[in-house]
């Protein structure tokens, strides 16, 4: 594969910049993680207080908005063990359910993903 000489001469500098960017992204992700934990803690306390005091809506005059406390039903994920069990119940045969799941898994499409990794020596 032919490379332009300009691309090849810039490669070391591009790698240095890429690694610096990786480090910056790592630091920002850590900050996001910390903020997400703090946000969840606040949300849990607010929800607990609103539920305890049976407050469904709370008007916020400073921001001209409101906070709503909602409850809704959500379906759980279908894990492999759960899928085989439910198919076995439906088909009245655990073996047939296992065959059906294996068939479906065997027919999944695959895709190629290219990555760039730093390996410590």
Image: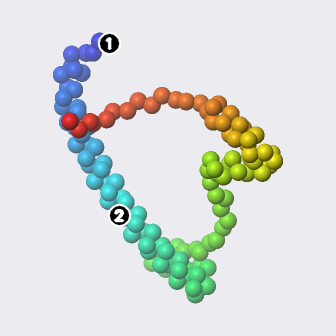
Classify mark 2: helix, strand or loop.
Answer: helix
Q: Which numbered circle lies on residue 34?
A: 2
Looking at the rendered image, the quarter that the N terminus falls into is top left
Distance (Cα) linking label 2 and label 1: 45 Å
> What x and y, as percent, mark residue 64?
50, 74
Label 2 crowd bin: few (<14), some (14–19), many (20+), radius 10 Å: few
Residue 85 showing in the rendered view: yes
Disc with the residue nearer the chain's start (2 vs 1) = 1
> What x and y, as percent, mark residue 21?
26, 43
Cβ atoms at labels 2 and 1 below 8 Å apart: no
The residue positioned 70% from the left and 51% from the top of the image is: 85
Q: Which numbered circle lies on residue 61?
A: none
Instruction: From the viewer's perspective, tell me whether residue 81 is left or right of residue 32.
Output: right
Label 1 crowd bin: few (<14), some (14–19), many (20+), radius 10 Å: few
The residue positioned 39% from the left and 69% from the top of the image is: 38
Quarter of the image where one finds residue 91? top right
Relative height, residue 90 to residue 3 (above, below): below
Residue nearest the viewer, comparing 15 with 91: 91
Instruction: From the viewer's perspective, tell me whether residue 75 is left or right of residue 61.
Output: right
What is the tally of numbered marks visible in this picture?
A: 2
> What x and y, as percent, mark residue 20?
22, 43
> What x and y, as percent, mark residue 35?
37, 64
Instruction: From the viewer's perspective, tell me whether residue 60 is left or right of residue 68.
Output: left
Q: Which numbered circle lies on residue 1?
A: 1
Relative height, residue 83 to residue 113 (above, below): below
The residue positioned 31% from the left and 54% from the top of the image is: 28
The residue positioned 62% from the left and 54% from the top of the image is: 77
Relative height, residue 51 to residue 16 (above, below): below
Classify mark 1: helix, strand or loop.
Answer: loop
Residue 64 showing in the rendered view: no
């Amino acid at each position: 594969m032919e490379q332009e000489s300009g691309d090849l001469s810039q490669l070391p500098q591009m790698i240095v910049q890429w690694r610096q960017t990786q480090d910056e992204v790592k630091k920002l992700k850590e900050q996001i993680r910390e903020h997400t934990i703090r946000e969840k803690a606040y949300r849990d306390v607010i929800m607990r207080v609103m539920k305890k005091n049976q407050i469904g809506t709370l008007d916020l005059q400073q921001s001209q908005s409101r906070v709503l406390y909602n409850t809704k039903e959500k379906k759980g994920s279908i894990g492999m063990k759960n899928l085989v069990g439910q198919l076995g119940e439906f088909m009245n045969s655990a073996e047939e359910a296992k065959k059906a799941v294996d068939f479906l898994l065997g027919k999944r499409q695959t895709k190629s993903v290219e990555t760039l990794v730093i390996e410590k020596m």
